[in-house]
Amino acid sequence: MSLFADLLGVFLNGLQAGAIYILVAMGLSIILGTLKFVNFAHGALYLIGAYAGLLIANEVRLSNGLLQQYGYETVGLDLGFLAALILVPVFVFVIGLLMERYLARAFYDRPDIDQILVTFGLAIIAQEAFRVLFGGQSINFARPGWARGPVMLPAIGNFPRWRLAVIAITAVLVLLVYLLVEYTDFGLIVRAGTRDPEMVELLGIKLTRPYIVMFAIGAALAGVAGVVGAPLENVNPSIGMETLVPAFLVVVIGGVGSIRGAVVGGVLVGMVYAILVGAPLASIPVIGGAISWSAWSQVGIYALAALILLLRPEGLFGSEEVS
Amino acid sequence: MADEVGTSTEQGFGDEGLYERWLAIKDNELTVAVITIVAVAIFPWLFADAPFLGDFLQGYRGLASLILIWGIFAIGFDLLLGYTGLLSFGHAAFWGGGAYVAGIFSAEVSGLPLLVVLAGTVFAVLFAWVLGFLSLRRGGIYFSILTLAFAQMLYYMAAAPLSSFTNGENGFTSVNVEPLFGAIDLGAHVFWPASILLGEMLYVFIAAFFVLAVMGAYRILNSPYGIVLNAIRENEQRAEFVGLNVWRYKLMAFIISGAFAGVAGSLFTIHGNYVPLQSLYWTESGEIVIITVLGGAGSLFGPILGAGLYLYVANVVSGFGTIGTLWHLILGIIFVGVIWLFPRGIWGIVSDVRDLIGDRMGGDR
């Protein structure tokens, strides 16, 4: 393989690694930017998305957990991946609506710390509920048939089909959200509400509904990220929090409330991963299987965040006023 | 000693009731010290060996020491959360980092307990300085997120790139604790009558640090310094306008609380002779947050109470059949309930009840 092909491979791997973080971070960033609500339970929404996707798409054999104890050894609908991709966002959207209405709204006027604490508590509840019901073991999320195996790409050679699918799905979703926020009346109202909620209300527009919808969209994005991301790794109760931390870093790097920031931050984080993982370039795992996250790649993204914080505390696309 | 305090204040308050006399001395530094020492001295016996109570609680002495260690951690954390209003999600870095450095120091340099604690604490202080410097560049929620992120960085460092020092996933096992001052074995029992209450020297060693931690925190909180920290929590902007260098105060509060965590982490190493990799993981930061908030942030004794309850439930109740498997879930639900309804935690509820009784007994109205 030539150097150019290696670099292209690393680039694609970086895009794929970043894609999941972009989806999670976009929702986090929107909710944080518009509603000023810190959602530590956003990772739990990812977790719910992953489990819901798993159970809709596949049939799963349980080896422990409460459900297994009560005789439900196989659970799941076995409807296929596309069904999961359509149903899960709807499901998590509804959860988002309920969460805004019955939880977040009660905490808008309370200190930031209370918001973090209560959503953190919620994240624990979600994680533990899954552990109790389905057991703590990792469950394999089978990839859909059409996305198994490698695909021949010019210059690069074999590349896992599923990773290309992840990149494509993310690109479509990012585009949709971008169009929604930038080019629709709904997006205009939400953006105006971020700047000056009082003025928007004086114009006779009630912000409650756009806000609750925005919250739910953010939640649904985390849910989709769960469906898309889970086939890359195994599903277990702790993946929610494991995704949340890097996603927060992406938000901090990109700047709060900025979709562009979430995308650029996610790509940057993904690239740092890919470059460090691929440092001995030959070790890039090409065909399926687990990704060999080498240890420095984990440390690298935190170093990136530290560097950007020192140079631009408000994030790459953030504005001073949001903070 | 308790009698001396009683008589010295008695003169000033003549014929007033017992309750008023108690009110007058209860916030006295000496009173706090005496109460702490007495409580710490009888705690392991009450907890583990007392007839009826000990059997009922099913406590054991190792757990009593562990509760004091987490108590120190919680006191330090509360200086930051309860008094300065900064929610750090990265204290696992100081707890686990201190524990690792203490362990490595004991194996490579010297196993003298005081030096081991010193090494762990110095590391925690230095690391808290760096982490605080970075994280405090953004306030509020960003601070929480950044502390969480940078603490995770330390975890990943210990997990693999530095595994030649830390022994990676298996945790650091070659801890080597020597006798205190080279003469007193920490595993030996204290001389006879005292050993009924205190048991091993290790407990005395840990308890001494605990008393120092309580007194240190008490001193800080009742000094002008503590008042500034409170002012920052109440209204940061106002504190800034008064001319205080808020950033420096916050950084110092962060470092002090990191030092407490470092002491606790080092003691944890000496206590267990082992440093699990888990001690650097973010869940450890989460646990200290839960302990402090459940117990009652913003009070000196609330977090200690929280540490006791949490560790008791985690180590004893979690063994009871079905409740054991569900305990994390139940804990999460209780945690959310407490934040929603009683932001001042268990200690807040206790002190509300106490005030109510106090009002009745005081007879002012």
Image (tube, coloured by chain):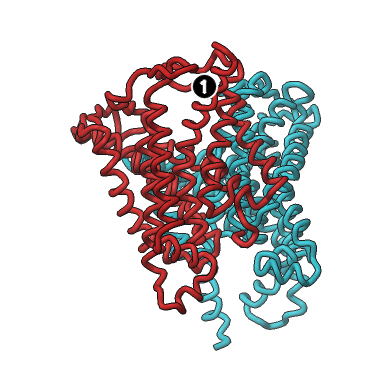
Q: Which residue is drawn at 57% across and 12% down?
A: A2
Q: Which residue is drawn at 54% across and 49% down?
A: B308
Q: Which image quarter is the N terminus of chain A in?
A: top right
| Lateral position of residue B207 relative to residue B349, left or right | right
Seen from this angle, which residue lies furthest bottom? B365
Above-or-below relation of B27 to B163: below
Q: Quadrant of residue B128?
A: top right
- List the residue tagged with mark 1: A9
Tell me the shade of chain A.
Answer: red
Seen from the viewer's position, the closer of residues B131 and B76 is B131
Q: Residue B298, position in %: x, y?
A: 61, 62
Q: Residue B317, position in %: x, y?
A: 41, 43
Above-or-below relation of B365 to B141: below
Q: Quadrant of residue B196?
A: top right
Q: Please rate how many residues cluster around mark 1, counting C-alpha atoms within 10 Å: few if below 14, some from 14 to 19, many from 20.
A: many
Chain identifier for the cyan-coloured part of the image: B
Q: Give the residue type that dot 1 points to.
A: Gly
Q: Which residue is drawn at 72% across and 22% down?
A: B107
Q: Which image quarter is the C terminus of chain A in?
A: bottom right
Q: In which quarter of the image is residue A64?
A: top left
Question: Is residue B160 something one can see in this rendering?
Answer: yes
Question: Is residue B42 something one can see in this rendering?
Answer: no
| Lateral position of residue B238 relative to residue B285, left or right | right
Q: How many labels does the image show?
A: 1
Q: Residue B256, position in %: x, y?
A: 73, 50
